[in-house]
Amino acid sequence: MLDTRDVHIDRAVSTMTLAQIQSPAGFIAGDVFPIIPVDFVSDKYYTYDPNVFARDDVRPRGPRDTVARIGFTTSQDQYTCVNKAIGTDIPDQVRNNADPAIDATLQQTASDLLAAQWRQHLERQWASNFFTTGIYGASAVGGLGLGTEVSGTASTPTPGTTIRHWSDQTNSTPIDDIRAAIRTFQKNSAGIKPNRLVLAAEVADALVDHPDIIDRVKYTEGALNDPQMFLTGMARLFGIERIVVADAVKATNAEGVTATYDFIQGPHALLAYRPASPSLMTPMTGAIFMHRNNLGSGMAMPTKMWRDEATASDVYESEAAFDIKICSKSLGYFFYNAIA
């Protein structure tokens, strides 16, 4: 008697494939440090000493008196782009033997793979160099002063040095901590207010669940039902233009062994300033200097394809020359280990 398997040979469906590629939205490096296109691999840029712009040197002037004259001072900092690249290939023998569902997307898959690799690389570099301890309270950059770093603790905090872990919903005071940090940020930077609060995913969870914050934000329309509206209400509470949640995930295993994953960012938080459009005489915490020849769209690097006849393959590669660096440490307030 006929069975269903007697009348059908299983093959790959042509209408769907399964791929778990995380959204670019959780990768936040470019939302904190703007991309600045540059024409040369290395160059210098001017920095202005902010002190004179915050002083009052206006003096009385009598008849025939000369005007009291002041001046401004500048110094120089430098970027140096490092060229990096990643590629993949599709041999003809592989393409010619591919099922229709795979063959239709081989080129797009190669492009998506390289884009994902770039997001991982840039985010990991930003996290390891600028979202970690020992950065904003270390030696000054460009004569612009120092930022601040505080650490989370499970014991009684010392103002200006430690904070109670925000995951301690009973004893911690995140509203007071962040407001005090904003005022310190302003005083350290000659009056610039931060406009970004960067929260690691688990830190954001702790703040969203904190009763002090819930009590202040619950009256924002939709805040208790919509996570994004809650963050909007929290940003309004602190007078911050935007709260950025860093929830990108990385593979922590080497190739060929059991897959393991973790968040790229540690359990920290950062107050920073990012200009809407970098230009002359603009403050910013840091920048991503990117050579124009490799400039893509946002954090996505352009992909090119070329033919490798020696291996009978189509090669896809993506290349960029860039330098991610702090421009002013005084425009940074870092909460190290903000949660337990």
Image: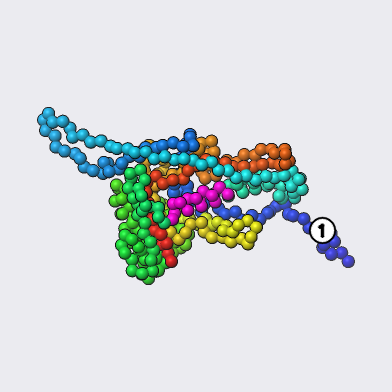
Q: Residue at x 61, y 60 (%)?
A: 259
Please say if 47 is above or below 147. above
Whether residue 161 appears in magenta in the rendering, the answer is: no
Q: Is residue 132 left or right of residue 142?
A: right
Which of 67 and 170 lies nearest the eye of the viewer?
67
Q: Hey, which residue is sitting farthest front in the picture? A: 139
Q: Residue at x 41, y 46 (%)?
A: 326
Q: Hey, which residue is sitting farthest top in the picture? A: 64
Please say if 190 is above or below 233. above
Instruction: Please report the bounds of the magenta region as a residue range.
Output: 117-132
Q: Quadrant of residue 182?
A: bottom left
Q: Is residue 182 left or right of residue 102?
A: left
Disc 1 secondary structure class: loop
Which of 233 and 112 lies nearest the eye of the viewer?
112
Whether residue 120 appears in magenta in the rendering, the answer is: yes
Q: Main secondary structure of the magenta part?
A: helix
- Tag 1: Cα neighbours inside 10 Å, few (<14), some, or many (≥20)? few
Residue hosting label 1? 8
Q: Residue at x 63, y 62 (%)?
A: 258
